Image: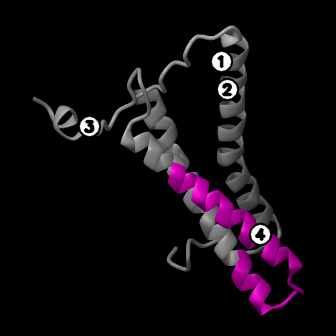
Amino acid sequence: MNDTAKTGISYVNGPKGYGIVSKAFHWLIAALVIVQCIVGIYAHSLPVSLERLIVLARHKSVGMTIFALMLPRVAWILYSPPPKMPPSNYYILHSLGARIGHLLFYALLLSLPIVGWLSSSASNLTVSWFGLF
């Protein structure tokens, strides 16, 4: 008897649902995207000041964290593909829409941090990860 059978928790995606690794990536990145939006809106409302630079530095750090988490997330999807959608009258349209939506969202989650880094670098602004490197 394997661990999945004992605990009911699966690490990999199966035909009936997502595994715990996919769920952890999903919710961690979702939470960071929400934090990123809040920090970005707050920074935009601030006048040019030291506080704004500090908030923007945190914004950049969270962006780099999202990018760093997206790389293993994409690798995990290649290793453990998501479960198939259940058949319905609109199966082809739903499946195609879900696939295109996911691909576009993943492209944004990978490209926006790169664009932010390039923008900062072009403006001669430093980019560090929470002041560590």
- Seen in the picture, residue 2 relative to 49 is either above or below; the reply is above
Sequence-earlier tag: 3 or 4: 3
Question: Mark 2 packing: few (<14 Cα in 10 Å), some, or many (20+)?
Answer: few
Comparing marks 2 and 3, which lies closer to the viewer?
A: 3
State which region is magenta: 27-56
Comparing marks 4 and 1, which lies closer to the viewer?
A: 1
At numbered mark 3, what does the secondary structure look like: helix, strand or loop? loop
Question: Mark 4 packing: few (<14 Cα in 10 Å), some, or many (20+)?
Answer: some
Q: Picture coordinates of residue 37 (x, y %)? A: 74, 63
Residue that numbered label 3 is attached to = 8
At numbered mark 1, what does the secondary structure look like: helix, strand or loop? helix
Sequence-earlier tag: 4 or 1: 4
The color scheme shown is one colour
Disc 1 marks a residue whose amino acid type is Ser
**Circle number at residue 33:** none
How far apart in space, not on screen, are marks 4 and 2 (Cα)?
A: 28 Å
Whether tag 3 and tag 4 are in contact, CB under 8 A, the answer is: no
Residue that numbered label 4 is attached to = 40
The picture quadrant where one finds residue 89 is top right
